[in-house]
Amino acid sequence: MKKLSILFIALAISLTSCKNEKKDTKTETNSGTITAEKFVVKPEATSVTWTAYKTTEKKGVGGEFTTIKFEEKMGSSAQEALNNLSFSIPISSLFTNDATNTRDAKIKTSFFGTMLDTEFIKGKINYENDVVSASITMNGITNNLPLEISITDDRRVTMNGNMQLKDWDALGALAALNKVCFDLHKGADGVSKTWEDVAIEVSTFLRKN
């Protein structure tokens, strides 16, 4: 009888232990189980802006791509959601808010229009070990663009980089653009210049799921 009592006590302890272990794996509320929040990156919450430069004083000319295409991607962290995100940007979506309505056409035709693969810029975000970069394909060439990342409120993400056009063999396209914009790219010194670097900024807001 004593042995049987000890057996019942051991069984009760074992069952209690199993119940506690199961409770540790999930959070329960009156309405049910709450799963961990996910971070979701969506194209409609993402923008790509750029700043090119003209004149020897390096005056900035800003623009954006109004369309960026990619499939929604989810992760348990901002890094997981952004890492390996593949995207494509239609050149036709370039917009500079130019009052004369001529600048956009010149950039599309004389710059991008002289490149290979003139329809899209394509790429993939790489985000591992707190290091961020974008593998970008433009003018038939794929190169890596290092990015600095800033995340505020856990969900607002800004990535900045400085593209050197020579790395994508785009100096010929730059010269073609400077030719059609020759007078417009003159500064006070009378020199026409279009710079070889372009500042890139990617902003997105990671939704909750």
Image: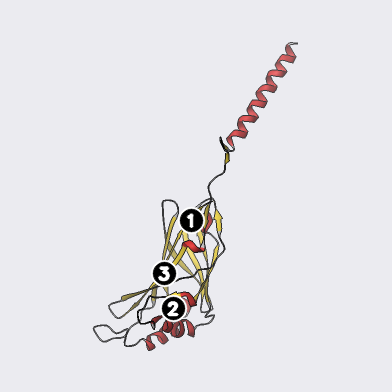
Query: How far across and how far down the image is residue 118, in percent?
Result: 52, 80
86 sits left or right of 195 in the view: right
Q: What amino acid type is highlighted by mark number 3?
A: Thr
Residue labelled with disc 3? 49
Tell me if label 1 and label 2 are in contact, CB under 8 Å. no
**Is 78 located above or below residue 179 in the figure?**
above
Give the distance between the C-alpha atoms of the residues marked 3 and 1, in whole angstroms: 18 Å
Q: Are marks 3 and 1 in contact (CB under 8 Å)?
A: no
Amino acid type at image mark 2 = Lys
At which x and y percent is residue 25?
59, 38
Res. 166 mark: 2
| Quarter-of-image position of residue 21 | top right
**Residue 12 image offset from top left, x and y in percent:** 67, 22
What residue sits 40% from the left and 86% below the top?
175
Q: Nearer the viewer, residue 27 or 116?
A: 27
Residue pointed to by mark 1: 206
Q: Nearer the viewer, mark 1 or mark 2?
A: 1
Label 3: state its secondary structure.
strand
Label 1 neighbour load within 10 Å: few <14, some 14-19, many 20+: many
Q: CA distance from mark 3 to mark 2?
A: 20 Å
- Residue visible at 38% across and 78% down? 196
Under mark 1, the amino acid is Leu
Nearest to N terminus: mark 3 or mark 2:
3
Judged left or right of residue 146, residue 8 is right
Q: Is residue 186 left or right of residue 126?
A: left
Residue at image point 39% right, 82% down: 101
1, 112: nearer the viewer: 112
Q: Quadrant of residue 54?
A: bottom left
